[in-house]
Image (cartoon, rainbow, N blue to C red):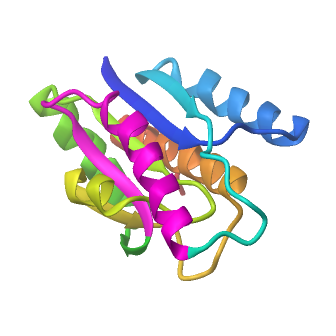
């Protein structure tokens, strides 16, 4: 079973999003050993300077990178990333299942991800050219991972 880990900056605070996340994690159990790692966002003042934001991103990068094994395939969600179709996601999962590489998806905080994390990534993904709150991006990503597995399994979920 393919190990899939989502590393996110910040926690879900709304019950609605917690319930949706739990539901998709439950669906994924039949396809992958899925783990959710939530890392606390670095604290920043209300109107941080660029240097404070950079320091916070580096602190978060330290916490993210220490959780990723050397042999892992890493997909970082970032605005400049490539937009994948559901079939592209299915192929990403299938390829890593065949090679035995664990897959790590990284969702940054409200200021994004450090360049160090982006450089570690094997692929940079963008959910859309639109901006979404991070808690919604997590649910959308979980759904697409689930959809990718169902495509690979030949299930009718993906129409």
Left or right, 20 with reference to 39: right
x, y percent for residue 28: 53, 27
Q: Residue furthest right?
A: 15
What residue lies at 47% left-to-right and 45% top-to-bottom? 60
Left or right, 141 with reference to 83: right
In this picture, is 98 found above or below 88? above
Q: Choose top left, top right, bottom left or bottom right for residue 133.
A: bottom right
Q: Quadrant of the N terminus?
A: top left
Q: Nearer the viewer, residue 16 or 148?
A: 16
Q: Nearer the viewer, residue 42 or 103?
A: 42
x, y percent for residue 74: 27, 45
Count of labels in the image: 0
Q: Is residue 73 magenta?
A: yes
Left or right, 80 with reference to 116: right
x, y percent for residue 35: 49, 23
Q: Is residue 157 visible?
A: no
In this picture, is 51 found above or below 38? below
Q: Choose top left, top right, bottom left or bottom right for residue 98.
A: top left
What residue lies at 27% left-to-right and 55% top-to-bottom? 116
Q: Is residue 75 visible?
A: yes
Q: Is residue 19 magenta?
A: no
What residue lies at 26% left-to-right and 49% top-to-bottom? 92
Q: Quadrant of the C terminus?
A: bottom right
Left or right, 19 with reference to 120: right
What residue lies at 46% left-to-right and 57% top-to-bottom? 55
Q: Which residues are magenta?
A: 50-78
Q: Nearer the viewer, residue 14 or 116?
A: 116
x, y percent for residue 20: 76, 37
């Amino acid at each position: 079973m393919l190990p899939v880990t989502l590393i996110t900056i910040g926690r879900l605070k709304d019950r609605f999003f917690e319930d949706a996340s739990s539901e998709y994690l439950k669906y994924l159990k039949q396809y992958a050993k899925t783990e959710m790692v939530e890392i606390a966002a670095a604290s920043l003042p209300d109107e941080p300077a660029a240097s404070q934001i950079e320091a916070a991103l580096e602190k978060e990068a330290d916490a993210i990178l220490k959780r990723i094994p050397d042999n892992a395939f890493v997909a970082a969600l970032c605005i400049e990333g490539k937009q994948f179709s559901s079939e592209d996601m299915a192929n990403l999962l299938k390829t890593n299942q065949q090679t035995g590489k664990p897959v790590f998806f990284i969702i940054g905080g409200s200021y994004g991800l450090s360049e160090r994390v982006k450089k570690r990534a094997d692929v940079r993904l963008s959910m859309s050219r639109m901006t979404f709150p991070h808690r919604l991006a997590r649910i959308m990503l979980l759904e697409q991972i689930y959809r990718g597995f169902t495509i690979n399994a030949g299930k009718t979920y993906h129409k």
